[in-house]
Image (tube, rainbow, N blue to C red):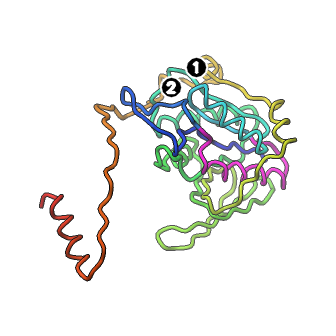
Amino acid sequence: MRIVVCVKHVPDADSDRRIEEGRLVRGEDDVLNELDEYAIEAAVSTVEELGGEVIALTMGPEESEDALVRALQMGADRAVLVTDEALAGADALGTARVLAAVVAALAGEEPVDMVITGMASLDGMTSMVAPAMATHLGWPLLDLAHSMQVEGGSPAAVTIERRADGNEDVLRSATPVVVSVTDQINEPRYPSFKELRAARSKPLDVWEVDELAEAGIDLDGITLSSIEVLAADPKLREAGVVVTDSGDAGRLLAEFITDRVEL
């Protein structure tokens, strides 16, 4: 079982974030996306049960290496960082195209059975990367899994349970497959001192544009972003209004809304 787990290095939600030249400033107080820890745990525990390899993959600035190191500490076997100034400003769909191309390149070395992602990144919260990767790879998508079982074989089979639109779905697919998991699927492990030390000797490859070209990935054919930032003027939120219900809260709420909405 060979699994690629996609992770992201995101600004700490508790830090002071700011926008410069239309972009969120990165590299200051950044951390591994918390929701990706569940994806790492799902990948590592699957390989512990069935055997195989876990490859942690991310695209971002050089500082994103820290997220991969954390994945290695949690049990991933190797890591790949895709970083280059030419990739700066990629949106979710552009990122998915590059990551899917990297997965395809890795599969050219040795077949990849699964790609596992978290349900979202806490900076963008689009939940678009996993579906877009599945589209570009031409693989089935099992998304928002709160339970997952993997059966070995050739091909292997993956069964998930998810809650969607008020329904409890059970989905099953043969591999290769893309799976996104929620924070209900497991309890991520905390690395031991031995695992922290072992992570230092695990391979972490850095791919820049030249390496991407050598792997057959042509950036000229990839649209990195369809979004143009015209202006960015973040403002601090004002203190909210607290209405004490003395029997007229409904009327007060209606007046509050109508005062601020043009009808």
Q: Which residue is mark 1?
A: 209
Viewport quadrant of the C terminus: bottom left
Q: Which residue shows up at 17% across the image and 68% down it?
A: 255
Q: Which residue shows up at 84% across the image and 30% down it?
A: 201
Which residue occupies the foreground of this view, 59 or 218? 59
Q: Quadrant of residue 218?
A: top right
Left or right: residue 243 versus residue 65 is left
Residue type at tag 1: Val
Q: CA distance from mark 1 to mark 2?
A: 9 Å
- Work out whether 253 lies above or below 73: below
Residue found farthest to the top: 210
| Residue 212, percent from left and from top | 61, 23
Residue found farthest to the right: 194
Q: Which residue is mark 2?
A: 87
Q: Quadrant of residue 244?
A: bottom left
Which residue occupies the foreground of this view, 111 or 114? 114
| Residue 133, percent from left and from top | 55, 43
| Residue 41, percent from left and from top | 73, 52
Residue type at tag 2: Leu
Label 1 CA crowd tier, 10 Å (few <14, some 14–19, many 20+): some
Which residue occupies the foreground of this view, 88 or 159? 88
- Disc 2 on helix, strand or loop? helix
Report the span colored magenta: 31-54
Q: Which residue shows up at 29% across the image and 70% down it?
A: 243
Residue 224 among magenta residues: no
Labels 1 & 2 near each other (Cβ < 8 A): yes
Tell me how many marks there are: 2
| Residue 224, percent from left and from top | 45, 30
